[in-house]
Image (cartoon, rainbow, N blue to C red):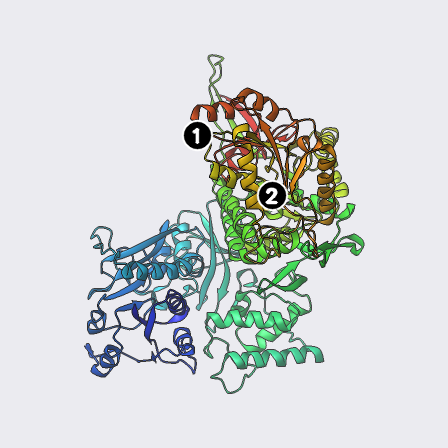
Amino acid sequence: MRIAVIGQSLFGKEVYKELVKEGHQVVGVFTIPDKDGKADPLGAEAEKDGVSVFKFPRWRLKGQAIPEVVEKYTALGAELNVLPFCSQFIPMEVIDAPKHGSIIYHPSILPRHRGASAINWTLMQGDKIGGFSVFWADDGLDTGDILLQKECEVLPEDTVNSIYNRFLFPEGVKGMVEAVRLIAEGKAPRIPQPVEGATYDPMQKKENAKINWDQPAEAIHNFIRGNDKVPGAWTEVNGTKLTFFGSSFTSCAPNPDGQPLEIPGASKPGVVTKNGLVLFGNDGKWLIVKNIKFEDGKMIPASQYFKSSDSTTLQLSEEEKTIANEIRATWKRILTNVADIEDSTDFFKAGAASMDVVRLVEEVKLKCNGLQLQNEDVYMATKFEEFIQMLVRRLRGEDAEETQVIDYVEKDANNMKIRMPHQLFINGQFVDAEGGKTYDTINPTDGSTICKVSLAQLSDIDKAVSSAKEAFENGEWGKMNPRDRGRLMYRLADLMEEHQEELATIESIDSGAVYTLALKTHVGMSIQTFRYFAGWCDKIQGSTIPINQARPNRNLTFTRREPIGVCGIIIPWNYPLMMLAWKTAACLAAGNTVVLKPAQVTPLTALKFAEMTVKAGFPKGVVNILPGAGSLIGQRLSDHPDVRKLGFTGSTPVGKQIMKCCAVSNVKKVSLELGGKSPLIIFTDCDLDKAVRMGMSSVFFNKGENCIAAGRLFIESSIYDEFVRRVVEEVKKIKIGDPLDRSTDHGPQNHKAHLDKLLEFCKTGVKEGATLVYGGKQVPRPGFFLEPTIFTDVTDEMFIAKEESFGPVMIISKFEDGDIDGVLKRANDTEYGLASGVFTKDINKALYVSEKLQAGTVFVNTYNKTDVAAPFGGFKQSGFGKDLGQEALNEYLKTKAVTIEY
């Protein structure tokens, strides 16, 4: 379609870009005039593409459309007007001109919160559900028919910025594009807005953002966050106007320790504490604000309100003067309208906007050896001299507790720059191992060293356990409301999603996972897991139990589900991030603290995850990550008296050793997910095409490095030859190559020792007399690549029929037609019982076989279909305990019974 885009801002720019990608012809862009010499992002983007851009200061004069403006618009012949975000009044002569009319984006679920401050009012009113509408423009004010709407949950501590960046911006862009697509297809609805529930809210300005203290604390919190950052909720203290930002609400009983601050109109004085300014509602409950802004524009941490500003101006060294001059040049490049950057130049009064803050933070990071400022740091030091003083203090290591500098290893990979922490993560800080011990982590694609990683020593393990114990027993985490805990986990999941491409790239180069699989499964399911268990945090509850009454007294018995304490978690190398998520998410949701040991050969996504816990706001000591040797770390965690639970995924022999040590040390609770030799039974009456496809996936998924991989396929005699023929034909089509190549099907094995083990496994199969019909050899190229391998004529006594390969090796055996009980006996003749599968169109047969198979998971006419809500775990020597689903919480909780006589 021929489209005219009318609007402004980054949101408008992204909508424009996506419409162009969809193949629409944007015939013109209408945006606002340049401000302080800066073009609006929408207009600048369109100009780069050679699209006609018009910057009318107004469309109407004295209520009438300006003929010259309408004429220029009409000449373009647009079939649809798209208004993603528009602050100008557009005359109806333009709105109604195109064949398809005009559509507008509005950041609320209409008819609620009509008006220009919809996001503010969504928060100020304490709405639990927010979202956006795309509607057909009419001559009313946000009253046109609805085309589509999308909803989102409003989190208790959302601000205008957070809900906009999390949902309204990204999903709004998609929504606008979807709306245009529906129009182009002739499927766009026109749903009249209901009268019921309609509200029109006035524009939120500074003059009406004064806080009313005569209301409950939660209402005050909603008002402050609804005005954060613009226009800013304010009050007067000692004749000075103070604006509050960064509000958090808690329903806990107040007991703040700090210095009182008299606030006119408030039910009781505020309290300046080390965590911020505590404010009270008329219901006695309280909230806390993080930052305070003065009338001159300076912002400070609320905890610093009574501390006199440091009157000592730092004297800069020559090196620091050089940095100051470089930063001055950066300010000049950003503030193009300012002739000279003076010490008194105010960043925002000179015309900087929120995107300029992001740019300044990134420029500082590049010029100052990775120093990571936060956006709030810029708001707190708006004048150039203040900014340089703050920057130099950070560079010198002052205010270290406020800023964490991470020693990243940076690499260019997958068309992006990835930044990888490589040190131990203990008590909220990345630190070197004792003695500076390190080891190399290897890229299995070519055998090259990715980077050196800190190698945890005995003293490091004890420090991590100690910090986890302190966080659990005395820290903020142990006192936190479960819903607040869930909010942190949701925030962590959002950060993982925001960085999912980087995480998937790191996973690919560290473990050899094909990138597309790493993105969808390794990372994608990890995000889903944290979101799933975040929802459980405030739903963990006990029960009341009727007991025999000892009359005349009466009794009440109830149970409490309580966290265990410090949990040790040891994860394998096949799904580094996903295995972390499966165990850690349930552990944290239950309220425990964690000391986690990633596999020595794949530590990097776990360390990146640790960085995200800091950004998400997890208290220090809650999560600790220790790369290194399992023989040292795993042993110490098993033996440590302060570790009360250990969760392990790995081999059966190591699991047995862990279980023994946990019993001897302090009888700690254990859950084990161990080896498998999962049988897959394929009957003649199956859908053969699907059985071949899923049979391939059951073995070769994630290059066979899959705990539930089908270790042995039993094929009914009458389809045996045809199945083998088809499988060999399909395996020949598998593309082996660089896991970052989007066309690659099969990447390298995880590490060289595992490749060597697989090659020996294949040699053993040949020696035993099995028929090697395909593969079995190392691919002649750099890296640790093994050909997908197929063995047939495998008999029950062979080594390869009994032992797990944990690689891309298909083991095929035959069973006689109709011998259901016979094949079940063979399938169950193993000490493992992790997973299994059956393919048949006969529902009676499927149910009978699934009942008789001795495995924790049975797949019927599918395979590898795990879900975060379904429990996962094995029988027999495949371990005990469950990951995922509600049952996983039981592994990280203890039950206490309380009986009261009254």
The percent position of residue 409, horizontal first and vertical second, equals: 67, 62
Q: Nearer the viewer, residue 357 or 261?
A: 357
Q: Which residue is mark 2?
A: 579
User: Disc 1 designates what residue?
Assistant: 841
Res. 589 visible in picture: no
Disc 1 packing (10 Å; few <14; some 14–19; many ≥20): some
Q: Is residue 46 above or below residue 278?
A: below
Residue 328, located in which quarter of the rendered image? Answer: bottom right
Disc 2 + disc 1, Cβ < 8 Å? no
Q: Residue furthest right?
A: 435
Query: In the rendered image, which quarter contains the N terminus?
Result: bottom left
Three-letter amino acid code at the position of disc 1:
Lys
- Upstream in the sequence, badge 2 or badge 1? 2
- SS at badge 2: helix
The label nearer to you, 2 versus 1, is 1
The image position of residue 819, as x and y in percent, is 54, 21
Along the line of sight, the residue nearer the viewer: 316 or 660: 660
Q: Amino acid at mark 2?
A: Met
Q: Is 598 above or below relative to 718?
A: below
Q: How many numbered discs, if any?
A: 2
Report, in whole angstroms, how far the alpha carbon at label 2 lies from the one at label 1: 34 Å
Q: Is residue 71 above or below residue 797?
A: below
